[in-house]
Amino acid sequence: MKELLEEEMHSHSDDYEIRRRQVLLTVIETFIETALPVGSRAVTQMTGLRLSPATIRNVMAELEQEGYLTHPHTSAGRIPTAKGYRFYVDELVTSERLTELQEQQIEEAFRQSEMVEKALGRVARVLGEITRQVGVVLCPQTGRSLLKRIELIPMRGKEVLVVLVTDAGAVENAIVLLEEEAGKGELARIAHFLNTELIDQSLSEIHENLYRRLLDERSSFFYVCKRAREILEKSALMADEGELLLDGTRNILEHPEFQRFDQFKPVLSLLEEKKELLRILKRDAESEGLHIYIGEEGGLENFRGCTLITSSYRIGNRRGGTLGVIGPTRLPYRRVIAAVNHVASRISKWMEMFE
Amino acid sequence: MKELLEEEMHSHSDDYEIRRRQVLLTVIETFIETALPVGSRAVTQMTGLRLSPATIRNVMAELEQEGYLTHPHTSAGRIPTAKGYRFYVDELVTSERLTELQEQQIEEAFRQSEMVEKALGRVARVLGEITRQVGVVLCPQTGRSLLKRIELIPMRGKEVLVVLVTDAGAVENAIVLLEEEAGKGELARIAHFLNTELIDQSLSEIHENLYRRLLDERSSFFYVCKRAREILEKSALMADEGELLLDGTRNILEHPEFQRFDQFKPVLSLLEEKKELLRILKRDAESEGLHIYIGEEGGLENFRGCTLITSSYRIGNRRGGTLGVIGPTRLPYRRVIAAVNHVASRISKWMEMFE
DNA sequence: TTTTAGCACTCTATTCATACGAGTGCTAAA
DNA sequence: TTTAGCACTCGTATGAATAGAGTGCTAAAA
């Protein structure tokens, strides 16, 4: 907008720029509150600017031409476009603090700290509740976590229980059926071998390097290596997808933009399929800080009219997962951003437990 | 209906009873197909009965008075009531076989057999898909599964990794922070103690008997007992809820009864809260065979207009969990019942793996 | 030059009247 | 016992009329 302005500002003053922003801000925030198109009269009443509706109309017409606002029809007020919201979140939105109560609610989610996934499920729920939107949490991807410990426990016959402990607090396990029975001593040797070779590598690294590393060895360990490889392959624990936890879909039914079914159906499909959402959230897990997707910005099909706000969280000093909120583009950005930021740093803090 | 009939049948013949059933059946099945109220003319065309609309109207009026049918309004055809559907599923509905394709889709869900929960997630999805409704699966409740093996693995300092293997194929685990560090030898003794004492009991039994059993012992094992108790308590693995997997909510948006929001909102809430649903499904896990809840029959609030069909599945010769389908009362019962039955026995078969 | 008042215009939402059609219930005849 | 006939009810579709909100433009005011 700044750029645009400077091009066109021939004769306009800084005051004029401020006014434009003021009007855009007012239209957007009023629309966020009421969900109704905002007319020029309403803007004059909301802003401190002592200007008549006619003047405001001129400004709004200009903002519309530049693509920040639209009309649903001729005789209606203005509503923000995706571009308008984008400018709003980039330049206009101010931060907000959560209320005491909301912070308490968040703490509650971390109260009973049993399994990681359950706690994160409660986090998704509380995110949905305090924003009145859909809360979403991407669990730490097991592929990215570092192996801390591997244990092989003999079961009946050829069965072996493989237990992996990772730094993400997750304990993965699988029962593997070996081709030949392995004695207790042999398993211990294999386990020892794996523990020395693989500790502190990420599971996906292990998966990638598996063939090279373990086949090259032509030492006396050859047999042990072979068995170790068999076990790791069969346990297939490296292939984990990164689980997605959702909660609060019912909340967004309250919003008037989803009262029409053709609007709501694609969103529900997106939420239930999870695939597209996973793509975005996994990518966001890679980079720190807040990400905002307005409409189809992130390449999310059928996401027109919706916004996704995410933030990644950390496990100690490593990447963890992502959490976020999904709602209509007409989102209370201030509150949602505050919530997402707060919860992200709270999870990171909580995750230090497992470091 | 039989009873009702015998009371009122003064002068009516068996033929008359057959006709009544025929009419009711036609109205219900036509309504299930079209979602439109069924008029007397439509019934005459569908049934083989050579009767005029007027005659049918008389029968329908009677069925309405008895509570099997209603009118949305005076000049509309008939639609079934909850009582009507109940009679239909109890007495009229006939069974159906799944198509080749549907059976293949189901097999697909069991193809990759990694973790139990993932496979069951795919089962929920396929149930939703082939019925075009919401598929739901209650995982085997860990509390009900038998303990097959318990392992204690020392971690850093006072931490101990507790691994439980149950007969439901589930491996539960938790990291426990002991009050005092325990040596490898000590843990081995404790593990051996637990393995001899607790094997083949259900986790909830263990939980209930824990205090009695382990405190009574005043033997030389006392210290071991105390530590064992500490570990079991802190791992809190007995308290598991029994996870509920849902899929296909998007499917039921297609049905006309949920086009109106006030109809859909309570259903979505019910699905997302999961609590009420868990109550029913857990209860159904106790008894074999098909269960059908039409409307609020099962004590499900806000379930008016919906039907839940469930069946339990087994793990070997023990109770496992429950699976089911949720949709509008106007449900293709024949197909859904076939699907639920088929999938239930297929899961049971699959579960034999873990016995 | 900038702002504003005034006004014609556009479009939506609402209301009312009307007509139509589907389907019923009842009655009397077959 | 069944059916034809008919009056009646009620929901839906259609169209006209109206009110109201808000705009864009123009010309006057600041």
Image (cartoon, coloured by chain):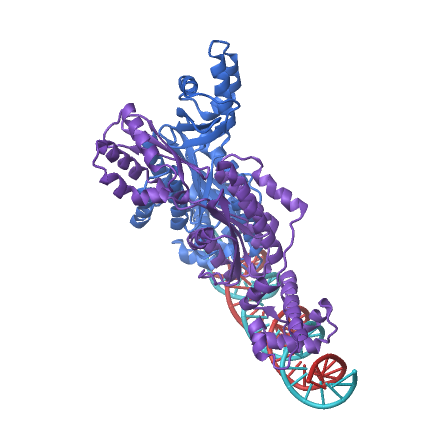
Chain colours: A purple, B blue, C red, D cyan
Residue B110 x %, y %: 33, 42
| Residue A213 visible in the picture | yes
Q: Camera-side residue: D5 or A64?
A: A64
Residue D14 x %, y %: 55, 74
Answer above or below: position of B181 versus B124: above
| Residue B277 visible in the picture | no
Q: Camera-side residue: B101 or A183?
A: A183
Residue B279 x %, y %: 52, 36
**In the image, is B195 to the left or to the right of B329?**
left
Q: In the orientation shown, which residue stands out farthest toward the front?
A: A219
Answer above or below: position of A36 versus B120: below
**In the image, is B111 to the left or to the right of C18?**
left
Q: In the orientation shown, which residue stands out farthest toward the top?
A: B219
| Number of marks drawn | 0
The answer to which image quadrant residue B95 occupies is top left
Q: Quadrant of the N terminus of chain A?
A: bottom right
Answer above or below: position of A110 versus A32: above
Q: Camera-side residue: B168 or B55?
A: B168
The answer to which image quadrant residue A126 occupies is top right
The answer to which image quadrant residue A205 occupies is top left
